[in-house]
Amino acid sequence: MISRSLFVAVLFTSVAATALAQSDNMTLVGQLDPRPGDSYSDVWTYVGPGGTEYALLASWINGGLNVIDVTDDVPVAVGFVPMSGDGSDVEAYGHYTYLTSNSDPTLIIDIEDPENPVSVGTFGGGFHTLSIVDGYLYGNGGGGVEIFDLADPENPTFVGNYSPHYVHDVLVRNDTMYTAGIFGEGIDIVNVSDKANPTMITRFNYPGSGVHNFCTDPSGAYLYAGDEIGSGQWTRIFDVRDPQNVELVGEIIVDSGSTVHNCHTKDNLLYLAHYGRGVWVFDIADPVNPTQLAYYDGPGQGSTWTANPHLPSGKIVASDIGNGLLVLRIDSLPTAAEPANPELPVLFALEAAYPNPFNPSTTLRFSLDSSADIRLSVLDAVGREVALIAEGSFSAGQHETSFDAKDLPSGLYLVRLEAEGRTASQRITLLK
């Protein structure tokens, strides 16, 4: 349960609206309404051949996927794939895009040629949101969470479900899943190491909750939970290092009269979209005491659904419900510095590979909470070791290496980290 002793302390770590209005530090690079008269929901990113950058923008009323080239400052719509239902949530996996609908099956779109996207199938029932992590797709909505294996991206295979109540969204990190019970049910922490049989570790809540979605800091020790329909519609910060004693340690309140929506994190930055208040970016080098870095709440902005920062160029693509796509850039990024919270422990973890899927190489990162003899290897789908990435004594802290698979065939592989009796693993997908 949440430690109630911290509710008073939270007042001192909250970020107040009066402090946020002093700086913008963000520029509108470009804007596009690809289908005037339509309305829009989520947005994802994709990098095509030659490094061309695209925004994948979901149409909400006249459902479908808008493919928009954002490489230059003037965004250009290059493709559209319609769907019968409303377009709700979108993510890319390799050169495939998955677009959910509340009322219809999820649409699978091949965007290998982004200017000629092709619908290649549907699966599942109606999902409001989805998350794709380590080769699995989590579809969320009235049926709780349904889990699909993407070993064959055009034919997702159902493997399991977790159905405590309506689940609005999830965050999956390694073998742990956080679920958003938006109608007051709170947050479940779930073990998904066995995708066919997810099991609840614990459930925690806060007064007047309406939990919408989540992000974490890079270590995974702190959970940022946005609230869309509760009595306080802002972001709360939870210390989740001990699942049996989750603590509320801070809040981010851009405007107590505004509603926070989707969030993303990249490196030490947290990106928040707000209905009526645009895009807000916070430096979370100190995860408990975020500081405002930038915001855009200017002309042409209505109600922002998502601000997605994952393009290599540093551009931020934001979906505006009534106005389409905004392309933004932070004017000045923080300089690299030691974490402001040096006492935060490093966790034993194998971080998510990036990119994943990949071709032909990907970056592998792992963290050690103490010095140890480790073995980092890659196994194929039948458990044979195909590569030894690192072996020997490593110091405590974060480590990074690369895996080059140019001599291996396309398929699923397992990255395994072994360290003195402990193991961590994750799936990666090579798509050639």
Image: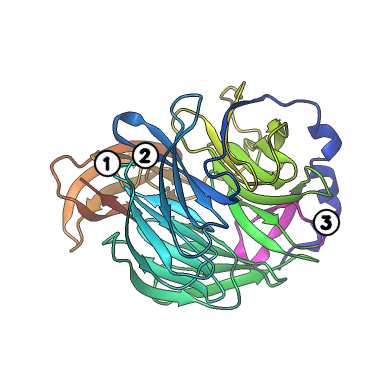
Q: Mark 3 is on which residue type?
A: Phe
Q: Return the x and y of residue 218 as percentages of the image width and height.
A: 53, 43
Instruction: Pick the residue in front: 248 or 329.
Output: 329
The CA distance from mark 1 to mark 3 is 45 Å
Instruction: Pick the residue in front: 221 or 207.
Output: 207
Q: Determine the image quadrant of residue 283.
A: top right
Q: Mark 1 is on which residue type?
A: Ala
Q: Is residue 285 shown left or right of residue 135? A: right
Q: In the rendered view, would you say 24 is above or below 236?
A: above
Asked if one can make out residue 424 in the rendered structure from this viewpoint, the answer is: no
Q: Give neighbour class at mark 3: few <14, some 14-19, many 20+ (Cα, 10 Å).
A: some
Q: How many marks?
A: 3
Whether tag 2 and tag 3 are in contact, CB under 8 A, the answer is no
Sequence-wise, which precedes: disc 2 or disc 3? 3
**Residue 390's mark?**
1
Q: Which residues are magenta?
A: 231-250
**Residue 331's mark?**
none
Whether tag 2 and tag 1 are in contact, CB under 8 A, the answer is yes
Q: Mark 2 is on which residue type?
A: Phe
The CA distance from mark 2 to mark 1 is 10 Å
Q: Determine the image quadrant of residue 421.
A: bottom left
**Residue 394's mark?**
2
- Camera-side mark, 1 or 3: 3
Q: Return the x and y of residue 406 as percentages of the image width and height.
A: 17, 39
**Residue 7's mark?**
3
Q: Return the x and y of residue 248 as percentages of the image width and height.
A: 73, 56
